[in-house]
Image (spheres, rainbow, N blue to C red):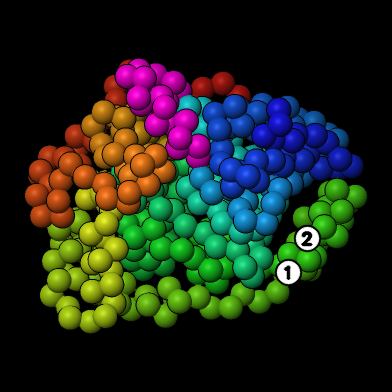
């Protein structure tokens, strides 16, 4: 497949995303190819660890291929989109639970679906210039691919803030929030990969790491904690409106651009997941939203405004102040026989 390169080198299984012109956006076929490789390598004694990287400097993976999702939505049959998410989430779970070390090298931007490939590794590397985000609420989706679980265990109320605003994280912020582990100079990546391929020993990652520069979000944490501790979107918005600070004003401006339904569901998901570390529970909860997304959420309108017409003026179903009381419960209700399951040979 031209969009992804999967092979074995030395003691390493190699997965390289090769769509740099599309910011290595993750297609359905790429998800399936990664999953097959993981299954093949679980019991392969020649593979001591896995290296996940990507071509180009602009992005490790800027997200899932939302144009593909939009085209599916336009067809009127959501089946392929639901299958895409189902199989992507199963692949995310396999990465999270994989019994061998996985080292991910995340240059440029890592967003959305890229988090599901790079941030479930055991050794998650960024360069000083790398940036990370979960901007799903801006297109009418929710933080998914298991990212909701990471957000649920971020310090204080940082998870709610990152998930609702889509804030971009520099390496120090990403490490603080639980999305990454190391900063390593990008110029040293080729030599480090060569060492990993030769030795199969992930301790080389620790030896190459440099201190992360503290990010802006860490400094903002007192303000974030003060306003994002509410039990719902409405409570968070009310808290921000009661404050005349620059932080509150800027944050309200960001929230005003995003889908109220998505943000409200994001808050609820983070709260539900705060007592578990089971990635399958987070993926199953995320799947409840995406299963309904094409016809019951703001997703199609969000993609239209962001990448199809590019007018940046989405017409959301609801405003910040008129979200129905039962809207979140409807989107996150159990799916019955359509519940996401993890059958087969997940480790």
Q: Quick check: is 71 in the magenta stretch?
A: yes
Magenta highlight: main SS:
helix
Left or right, residue 150 beside residue 195: left
- Neighbor class of circle 1 (other Cα within 10 Å; few <14, some 14-19, many 20+) is some
| Residue depicted at 75% across the width and 34% down the height | 6
Q: Quick check: is 186 in the magenta stretch?
A: no
Left or right, residue 130 beside residue 299: right
- Neighbor class of circle 2 (other Cα within 10 Å; few <14, some 14-19, many 20+) is some
Q: Which mark is residue 189?
A: 2
Q: Is there CB contact under 8 Å for labels 2 and 1? A: yes
Location of residue 291 (image quadrant) = top left
| Residue depicted at 77% across the width and 40% down the height | 14
Task: Report if residue 159 is visible in the image.
Answer: no
- Residue 197 in picture, x, y percent from top left: 85, 48
Question: For the magenta stretch, what is the residue range?
Answer: 64-83
Residue that mark 1 sits on: 185
């Amino acid at each position: 497949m031209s969009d992804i390169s999967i092979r074995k080198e030395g003691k390493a299984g190699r997965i390289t995303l090769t769509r740099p012109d599309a910011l290595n956006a993750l297609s359905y076929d790429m998800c399936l190819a990664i999953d097959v490789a993981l299954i093949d390598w679980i019991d392969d004694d020649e593979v001591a660890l896995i290296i996940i990287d990507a071509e180009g400097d602009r992005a490790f993976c800027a997200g899932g291929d939302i144009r593909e999702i939009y085209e599916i939505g336009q067809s009127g049959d959501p089946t392929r989109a639901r299958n895409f998410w189902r199989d992507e989430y199963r692949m995310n779970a396999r990465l999270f639970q994989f019994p061998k070390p996985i080292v991910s090298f995340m240059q440029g931007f890592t967003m959305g679906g890229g988090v599901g490939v790079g941030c479930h590794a055991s050794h998650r590397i960024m360069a000083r210039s790398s940036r990370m985000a979960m901007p799903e609420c801006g297109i009418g989706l929710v933080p998914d691919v298991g990212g909701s679980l990471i957000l649920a265990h971020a310090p204080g109320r940082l998870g709610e803030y990152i998930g609702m605003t889509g804030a971009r994280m520099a390496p120090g912020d990403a490490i603080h929030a639980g999305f990454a582990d190391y900063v390593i100079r990008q110029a040293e990546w080729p030599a480090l990969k060569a060492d990993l391929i030769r030795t199969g020993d992930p301790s080389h990652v620790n030896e190459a790491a440099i201190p992360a520069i503290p990010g802006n979000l860490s400094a903002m944490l007192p303000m974030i904690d003060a306003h994002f501790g509410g039990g719902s979107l409405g409570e968070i918005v009310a808290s921000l409106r009661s404050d005349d600070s620059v932080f509150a004003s800027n944050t309200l401006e960001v929230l005003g651009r995003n889908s109220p339904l998505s943000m409200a569901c994001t808050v609820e998901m983070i709260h539900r997941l705060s007592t578990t570390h089971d990635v399958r529970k987070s993926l199953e909860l995320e799947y409840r939203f995406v299963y309904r997304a094409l016809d019951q959420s703001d997703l199609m309108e969000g993609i239209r405004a962001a990448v199809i017409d590019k007018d940046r003026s989405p017409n959301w179903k609801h405003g910040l102040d008129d979200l129905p009381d039962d809207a979140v419960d409807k989107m996150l209700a159990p799916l019955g026989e359509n519940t996401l399951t993890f059958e087969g040979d997940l480790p």
